[in-house]
Amino acid sequence: MRMAISQKFPSVRKIGESIVAWFVIGFLNISAWLPFTWLQGLGRFFGGLMARFNSHSRFLVRCNLRAVYPQLSDAELTVLSKAVLQHNAQSITELGAMWLGSRQTLQGLIHNVHGEQYLQSAFAQGKGVLLLAPHLGNWELAGNYLAMNYPATFMYRPPNLRALAPLMRRSRERFGAQLAPTDLRGVRQVIKALKSAQVSGILPDQDAGENGVQVPFMGVPARTMTLASKLLQKTDAHCLFIMALRNQKGGFELHILPADRDALADKDPVRAATALNHGVAQCVQQAPEQYLWAYRRFRGAPGIYQK
């Protein structure tokens, strides 16, 4: 079997990664200076192209939507798929503003905050808060909001494109947030932060692989994390959901929603994961077109992604 050039010559792969990173960093720096409505328009344009052509992203979106919304007609599925791809593309074109935008710029993008009283109430009791942020709307903005307003510690995994790691790290730390690695040492750091009345945010809907448990998400089996329940079991932290949804005015509505802490902290991992997916699903139903359907959320379920 032939080896790929990048396998034979690792230096070639590194050069290729550096070139890609140079273009990505250049785009992020340029886009950070552009009007935000332009960035959103660019995302809608690229998302529309992906919906029009037989892209891999379109395939994944349609597979996921057909699994969770089997009642949709072909026409309805096509309309929703296009909207999903446009919002998913916006999450990418908005990234320069999210990573490099000033505090004033980001605050201006958040038109309203709904449910902040839940977060303030937890802090008034001197307790930490675990924020669960699904891949919905712009989760980068939700993290920025927390870092700008509260002492925060977030788990951080370096990007696959390693040359982007320094920029990503600086962007996450620029408002004072502490970063914890995605390993046992990082989990201990998050537990310590929650016990010290800080906020910590995690993305609860990533495919958990072999470390998770298989429970339904919107009616379809999905490998689901157990980290959230373990963090709640080891602390007396409150638990809330958070999401930044795009509105029709070129900005965002930030929503903070109560979570069923007792169910999420259940010592039975299946019951806890089921409660977690139920909470995420309730968030998704508020704006299903803004959810990140363009990835293999149901990787462990047979037949979902057959062509």
Image: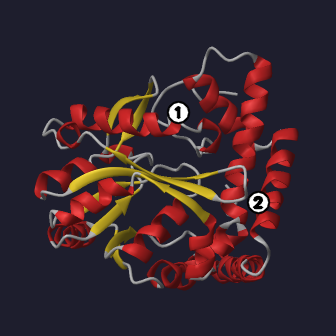
At numbered mark 1, what does the secondary structure look like: helix, strand or loop? loop
How busy is the neighbourhood of tag 1: few (under 14 within 10 Å), some, or many (20 plus)?
A: few
Give whichever of discs 2 and 1 has the lower sequence position: 2
Instruction: Tell me the colour scheme of the image.
Output: secondary structure
- Determine if residue 81 is in view: yes
Kind of residue sitting beneath label 1 = Gln
Q: Specify whether 193 is left or right of 98.
A: left
Residue 109 placed where, x, y %?
A: 63, 66
* Along the line of sight, the residue nearer the viewer: 158 or 88: 88
Point out residue 305 in the picture as x, y percentages from the top left corner: 61, 31
Residue 105: image quadrant is bottom right
| Residues at marks 2 and 1 touching, judged by CB atoms closer than 8 Å | no
User: For the residues marked 2 and 1, what is the alpha-carbon distance in whole angstroms?
Assistant: 22 Å
Disc 1 designates what residue?
285
Q: Nearer the viewer, residue 95 or 18?
A: 95
Asked whether 161 or 167 is in front, the reply is 167
Please give the residue where the numbered disc 2 appears in the rendered image. Answer: 40
Question: Which of the image's four quarters has the N terminus?
Answer: bottom right
Residue type marked 2: Gln
Identify the residue at horizontal 60%, vertical 41% (top origin): 293
- In the depicted structure, whether residue 70 falls above or below residue 170: above
Compared across the picture, whether 67 is left or right of 203 comes to: right
CA neighbours of label 2 inside 10 A, class few (<14), some (14 to 19), many (20+): many
Element at label 2: helix
> Quadrant where the C terminus lies?
top right
Residue 62, disc: none
Q: Residue at x 43, y 46 (%)?
A: 205
